[in-house]
Image (cartoon, rainbow, N blue to C red):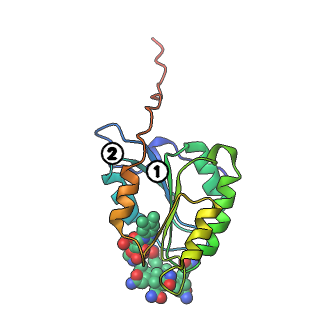
Amino acid sequence: MTSDLTPDRRTSAATATQPRGTVVVTTVASDSHTWNLVFLQLLIEELGYEVVNLGACVPDRVLVDACRELAPDLVVISTVNGHGHHDGLRVIGALRSCGELAATPVVIGGKLGVAGKQSTGSIDALIAAGFDAVFDDASTSTLEFSRFVTALPAASPRPVARTEVVA
Ligand code: B12
């Protein structure tokens, strides 16, 4: 499957000034909830980033291909249907096994299970699998997530795509 992620398909409010970088917002293959993604997109755009929102029910391969194409400064995985812990372990394995994405910051958050607050062991397992941070709804706040995003190093400017004009 190919992904068309050319700039005109991206949704971003950060057009007036140079964005701080690019963030991929996504959920996992099993999860069809979308308003969580809209919320995160708006929040991250307010923090100055261009956001590529991959939408609901994103297959692992589509996410990996999109991240390889975009080389984002951060990948934010949102999951609320209760399968997040299980799905997250699989997805981070797919991302981290791709050489270009081995060091990309990747976080997961939302309602990660069906029993409310995640145990320390459950969160530690996600971190050990490769996530840089876990934002479990029951134990973290949006403010903590905003601080994490704000603390990311600003991306180096990317070359602007130019159209050749033939006189
Ligand atoms: C609307 C809805 C649906 C709609 C979704 C439509 C759509 N286009 O999105 C439909 C009907 C499709 C649906 C289906 C299901 N749903 Co539903 N759904 C909801 C509902 C009522 C509202 C979700 C919503 O839009 N909230 C608004 C958004 C903005 O908020 P949010 O999703 O809570 O996200 C916030 C936080 O989680 C957090 N967050 C989320 N991700 C991340 C990531 C990071 C990094 C950070 C920092 C924060 C963060 O930030 C957001 C803003 O605060 C909730 C219950 C509720 N009142 O929340 C259940 C709920 C999420 N659904 C639930 C379930 C179980 C299902 C189904 C499995 C039901 C079923 N048996 O079929 C299916 C799953 C389908 C699937 N394959 O995923 C459960 C999940 C249980 C759990 N995790 O413990 C909930 C909590 C209901 C419940 N109380 O049981 N659902």
Where 24 falls versus 108 (above or below)? Answer: above
Amino acid type at circle 1 is: Val
Q: Which residue sits at x=30%, y=38%?
A: 17
Which quadrant of the view contains residue 82?
Answer: bottom right
Res. 59 visible in picture: no
Q: Which residue is mark 2?
A: 14
What SS does tag 1 mark? strand
Amino acid type at circle 2 is: Ala
Which quadrant of the view contains residue 19?
Answer: top left
Give the position of the C terminus as an image quadrant: top left
List x then y, in percent, for residue 162. 46, 25
List x then y, in percent, for residue 137. 43, 75
Instruction: Find the residue positioned furthest to the right.
Output: 97
Q: Which residue sits at x=45%, y=33%?
A: 156
Mark 2 burial class by Cα count in 10 Å: few <14, some 14-19, many 20+: some
Mark 1 burial class by Cα count in 10 Å: few <14, some 14-19, many 20+: many
List x then y, in percent, for residue 111. 48, 77
What SS does tag 2 mark? loop
List x then y, in percent, for residue 89. 65, 67
Question: Is 2 or 13 nearer to us in this picture?
Answer: 13
Disc tally is 2
Q: Is 108 on the left or on the right of 45, as rendered?
A: right
Mark 2 or 1, nearer chain start: 2
Question: Is 113 or 32 nearer to us in this picture?
Answer: 113
